[in-house]
Image (cartoon, grey):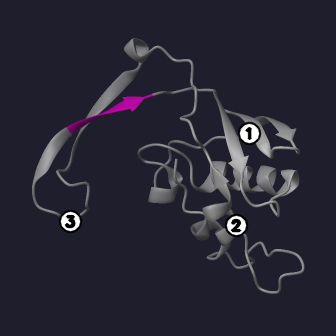
């Protein structure tokens, strides 16, 4: 899973700064300081998922010439659980929770998500289980 954290922290009028580190923002810490080793577990039967066919660029780049039909899943409601491994100890439970809420509102997941100017894919965190010894989280999002 890849998020563009910099779009959240460095383009706002009041970017979230790291206390005690001058003008440093959280972008670098979240870009290289967290990792998800596994996909989000959704507990959804793939056979029950609807889809939409769209005409998309063959290479995925806007403005390129040739188009093909691509099929994308539509999941109107979902709940997922995943583990986040923190590699940078500067990321605290409070900061992670705050950034996940921001990511859920402004980045989202999937096709036509807010990060790409869309309306789909927003999420909010419903539960965080913090393991300070190993900095591993069990995350639930809907």
Q: Residues within 10 Å of mark 1 (few under 14, many from 20)?
A: some
x and y percentages locating residue 95 in the rendered image: 82, 58
* Residue 15 among magenta residues: no
Range shown magenta? 70-74
Residue 115 rendering spot, x and y as whole percentages? 51, 58
- The tag on residue 125 is 1
Element at badge 3? loop
Say which of marks 1 and 2 sits in front. 2
Point 56% across, 18% down: residue: 43
Kindly report the distance in space between the C-alpha atoms of the residues bearing marks 3 and 1. Answer: 35 Å
Say whether disc 1 or disc 2 marks the residue closer to the N-terminus.
2
Q: Which residue is more in the foreground, 35 or 126?
A: 35
Residue at 46% across, 51% down:
118
First reached walking from the N terminus: tag 3 or tag 1: 3
Q: Nearer the viewer, mark 3 or mark 2?
A: 2
Q: What residue is pinned by disc 2? A: 29
**Whether residue 17 is situated above or below residue 100 in the rendered picture:** below
Q: Position of residue 3 (x, y in %)?
A: 55, 56
In this rendering, position of residue 92 left or right of residue 73: right
Whether pointer 3 and pointer 1 mark residues with C-beta atoms closer than 8 Å, the reply is no
Q: Earlier in the sequence, mark 3 or mark 2?
A: 2
Asked if labels 2 and 1 touch by Cβ distance under 8 angstroms, the answer is no
Task: Name the dominant secondary structure of the magenta segment.
Answer: strand
């Amino acid at each position: 899973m890849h998020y563009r954290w910099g779009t959240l922290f460095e383009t706002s009028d009041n970017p979230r700064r790291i206390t005690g580190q001058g003008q440093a923002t959280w972008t670098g810490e979240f870009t290289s300081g967290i990792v998800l080793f596994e996909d989000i577990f959704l507990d959804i039967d793939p056979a029950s998922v609807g889809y939409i066919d769209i005409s998309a660029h063959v290479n995925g780049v806007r403005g390129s010439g040739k188009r093909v039909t691509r099929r994308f899943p539509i999941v109107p409601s979902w709940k997922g659980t995943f583990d986040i491994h923190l590699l940078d100890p500067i990321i605290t439970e409070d900061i992670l929770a705050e950034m996940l809420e921001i990511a859920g509102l402004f980045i989202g997941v999937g096709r036509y998500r807010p990060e790409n100017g869309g309306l789909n894919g927003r999420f909010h965190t419903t539960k965080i289980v913090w393991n300070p010894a190993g900095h591993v989280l069990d995350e639930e999002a809907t």
